[in-house]
Amino acid sequence: MPIVTVKMLEGRTDEQKKKLVEKVTDAVVEAAGAPKENVTVIIEEMAKNHYAKAGVRASEQ
């Protein structure tokens, strides 16, 4: 029962998230040989002011 967590900044459309979930699921099925119905994908979205790189918040870029 593979569980994949994708952490990303907010702002993607529902269609983009749908495609992401489909492709991640397919990759796990192909690479790990897991049955598709056993693959779980969790998307965790972060507000841009909750993420920083090199001391600069994404909301400030």
Image: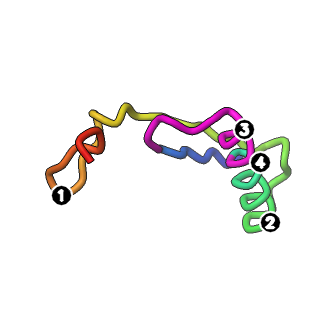
Sequence-wise, the earlier of marks 4 and 2 is: 4
Given residues 43 and 32, the one toward you in this image is 43
Given residues 36 and 9, the one toward you in this image is 9
Cα distance, mark 1 to mark 4?
A: 32 Å
Q: Residue at x 24, y 46 (%)?
A: 52
* 16 falls in the magenta region: yes
Sequence-wise, the earlier of marks 2 and 1 is: 2
Cα distance, mark 3 to mark 4?
A: 11 Å
Please tell me whether mark 1 sits on a helix, a strand or a loop: loop
User: Seen in the image, is 48 located left or right of residue 25?
Assistant: left
Name the quadrant of the N terminus: top right
Q: Nearer the viewer, mark 2 or mark 1?
A: 1
Q: Which residue is mark 2?
A: 30
Cα distance, mark 4 to mark 2?
A: 12 Å
Q: Quadrant of residue 18?
A: top right
Q: Which mark is residue 15?
A: 3
**Relative height, residue 38 to residue 24 (above, below):** above
Sequence-wise, the earlier of marks 3 and 2 is: 3
Q: Which residue is mark 4?
A: 22
**For the residue marked with disc 3, what is the amino acid?**
Glu
Please tell me whether mark 4 sits on a helix, a strand or a loop: helix
- Magenta residues span 8-20
Sequence-wise, the earlier of marks 1 and 3 is: 3
Given residues 26 and 3, the one toward you in this image is 26
Q: Residue 56 at x, y = what percent?
A: 18, 49
Sequence-wise, the earlier of marks 3 and 4 is: 3
Give neighbour class at mark 3: few <14, some 14-19, many 20+ (Cα, 10 Å): few
Q: How is the image coloured?
A: rainbow
Q: Residue 7 at x, y = what percent?
A: 47, 44
Q: Which residue is mark 1?
A: 54
